[in-house]
Image (tube, rainbow, N blue to C red):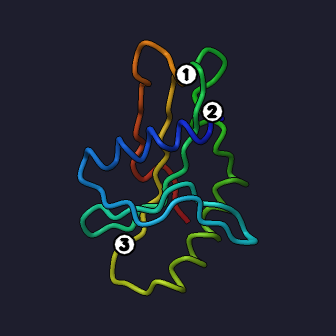
């Protein structure tokens, strides 16, 4: 499945950059968060968008204001169960490529992509 492959690539990308992945696929009745990670003083809620390429639109364009609102609501729910002094941040990771391709995926990490 393309989404699962893209999320795995995004987790590996974050880990290589020193992030501590705390949870994946956190689901609430409000919505889902693909990856929850820690980056220094930040608790980072990551939406992963996987596409073959950006021919028709950048992957980040699929994170609509409605989707952002659902992610923020889910993040608030997660934070209620995990009180901490870390600052929340919302990132988007675009993964371009195909599973099994001869070239690794191109990953674009957009920090602080949206907020509430």
Label 3 crowd bin: few (<14), some (14–19), many (20+), radius 10 Å: few
Q: Earlier in the sequence, mark 2 or mark 3?
A: 2
Q: Which residue is mark 2?
A: 2
- Asked if residue 6 is positioned above or below residue 83 in the image, the reply reads above
Viewer-nearest residue: 31 or 10? 10
Q: Quadrant of residue 72?
A: bottom right
Where is the C terminus found, in terms of image quarters? bottom right
**Quick one: SS at disc 1?**
loop
- Res 34 → quadrant: bottom right
- Disc 3 or disc 1, which is closer to the eye? 1
In the displayed structure image, the side of residue 85 where residue 107 appears, left or right = right
Q: CA distance from mark 3 to mark 1?
A: 34 Å
Question: Residue drawn 42% across and 42% down?
Answer: 110
> How far apart are the two marked residues, 2 and 3, measured between alpha carbons?
31 Å
Q: Position of residue 4 (x, y in %)?
A: 59, 42
> Residue drawn at (51%, 25%), measured in percent from left and top?
96
Q: CA distance from mark 2 to mark 1?
A: 7 Å
Relative to 18, does residue 97 appear above or below in the rendering? above
Give the residue at x 48% y 43%: 8
Q: Residues within 10 Å of mark 1 (few under 14, many from 20)?
A: some
- Residue 27 vs 34, above or below: the answer is below
Furthest-front residue in this view: 100
**Quarter holding residue 61:** top right
For the residues carrying marks 2 and 3, which lies nearer the camera in this image? 2
Q: Secondary structure at mark 3?
A: strand
Q: Do tag 2 and tag 1 residues touch (Cβ < 8 Å)?
A: yes
Q: Which residue position holds label 1?
A: 98
Name the disc covering residue 87, or none. 3
Disc nearer the start of the sequence (2/1)? 2
Q: Is residue 68 left or right of residue 16?
A: right
Whole-percent x and y of residue 69?
Answer: 67, 61
């Amino acid at each position: 499945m393309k989404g699962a492959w893209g999320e795995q690539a995004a987790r590996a990308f974050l880990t290589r950059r020193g992030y501590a992945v705390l949870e994946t696929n956190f689901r609430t009745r409000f919505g889902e968060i693909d990856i929850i990670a820690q980056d220094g003083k930040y608790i980072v809620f990551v939406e992963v968008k996987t596409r073959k390429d950006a021919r028709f639109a950048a992957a980040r364009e699929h994170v609509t204001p409605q989707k952002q609102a659902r992610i923020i609501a889910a993040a608030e729910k997660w934070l209620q169960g995990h009180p901490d002094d870390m600052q929340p941040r919302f990132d988007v990771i675009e993964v371009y490529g195909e599973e099994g391709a001869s070239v690794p995926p191109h990953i674009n990490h957009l920090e602080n992509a949206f907020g509430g």
